[in-house]
Image (cartoon, grey):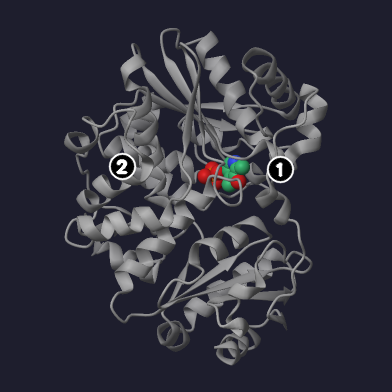
Amino acid sequence: MEFSSTRSKELRVSFRDAVLHCLPSDGGLYVPASMVDLRPFFLYMDSETTYPELVATIAPVLLQGELNPISAARVAESAFSFEPELKRLDANLSVLELHNGPTGVFKDFGIAFLAAVMEELLKPSGHAMTLTATTGRTGVSVAQAFKGRTGITAVILYPEGHVRGLDPSTFVNNGGNILPIQIEGTFDDCQRLIRDAFEDRPFAERYGLTSANTINVGRLLPQAFYFLYAFIKIKKELHGDLLFSVPSGNFGNLIAGLYAWKFGLPVNGFIAAMNANDTFGDFFRGQSFVPHIPVRTLSRSMDVGNPSNYERLAAFYNEAPAVMKHMVYSERVDDEATLAAMERAWKRYGLHLDPHGAVGFAAAERLLAGDIEDGHVVVLSTGHPAKYADLVARVTGKAPITSEVLENLQKEVAPVAVIPARLDALESAIAGAL
Ligand SMILES: *Cc1c(COP(=O)(O)O)cnc(C)c1O
């Protein structure tokens, strides 16, 4: 399968180019250029199939000619020491827990695949450098996924006061390949610096710069895999419609689910579950989307006013308007309803949810009570409840199970360099560290 730009169907590149160059020259974003029918490959799988097995089987079909089955098996094994877990709650409701990775959020899945597949694509002697802007966890996820990967240096940019949870033995100054740099500025300054670095063509080419943020389709594509995984785990007990409730902020998971449909997933609908930042609901109701300043809610990672995946959703809409109109439902869940959902999930099912998962849970309940009586909704649990231990304990009366890994995320670490928010300073910090 090739990849095209959201702004031009004619522009076609390989997966390798899409991953290693990240942004098409026309200013759009890369998206899968065609439908690939994966049904012959996953329909025979059953609840015994493991996640690495599923990935190793379907990735080489999707990326035919670029990733052979042996390489794909190596990628799947080295990426996934953690798996999604499907928990069936009752006849109409399940949760797909995606918070079992090293940082307790679903983003670990896309990042882990990206790191492993990049190493494979660069063999035998290529090199690349990923740039990532983060205020915390994504940095830990990137460092975990990229550490020790041959041919790759992972540069992680932090705003002031945010470098936490990294393992200094993986840093470039200790012989590793992870380079955390703190910027004297804000998160926006970090993002601006990354854009500027990409625009400095000679610099970008010398280091083979690419991004490990979700603009990289190599991180988005593998998110389609866990929708297929949920299906094979549940298909035996499935009678009516299958829907997914997707807690959404930047809409990476939602677009990945739509790609899974494109690859043959027998799904009847998606719920775009949003918190108070739901102006995107207008878009799903067929109106135009106007970016806004986000308000702060309990489900912070979904406080996004101008999602970068808007461009991918709009491109999908042009391609398949009927799917968008009839298969995507939007729900707005405010903080009060989020807390009530956390409490109900605990009382009814003994299930702890974080506020993000609870938005998805509340939206699923609403749909089941109304339009969809005979359906089964799979709620994506995108974040680990232990990250919100105090809140979860207060709402449910019981502290969630925590893990040492998640506690270590809070430990402060000294970055390799602290620099002013200027491109020349970034470039010399990178040159000096390698
Ligand atoms: C990033 C994040 C989301 C939002 O996911 P998108 O794919 O950006 O819509 C939801 N929940 C948690 C816990 C997150 O970290």
Looking at the rendered structure, the kind of residue marked 2 is Leu
Q: Position of residue 52 (x, y in %)?
A: 35, 46
Ligand 1 placement by image quarter: top right
Residue 416 location, quadrant: bottom right
**Quarter location, residue 18:** bottom left
The amino acid sitting under disc 1 is Lys
Residue closest to the eye, 268 or 317: 268
- Rendered view: 375 above or below 13: above
- Residue 5: x and y in percent read 33, 59
| Mark 1 or mark 2: whose residue is earlier in sequence | 2
- SS assignment at label 2: helix
Q: Which mark is residue 177?
A: none
Look at the numbered disc 1 and give the secondary structure of its residue: helix
Asked whether, in this view, residue 306 is left or right of residue 36, the answer is right
Mark 2 CB in 8 Å range of ligand 1? no
Asked if 127 appears above or below 319 in the picture, the reply is below
Q: Is the residue marked 1 within 8 Å of ligand 1, measured from its CB?
A: yes
Quadrant into which the N terminus falls: bottom left
**Residue underneath mark 2:** 54
Q: Residue at x 56, y 65 (%)?
A: 143
Observer able to see residue 241 = yes
Query: Which residue is at 60% across, 57% downward?
Result: 138
Q: Quadrant for residue 28, please give it.
A: bottom left
> Label 1 crowding class (10 Å Cα cut-off): few <14, some 14-19, many 20+?
many
Residue 297 appears in the picture as rendered: no
Q: Which mark is residue 387?
A: 1
- Residue 201 placement, left or right of 137: left
Q: Residue 392: horizontal and vertical position, in percent? A: 76, 31
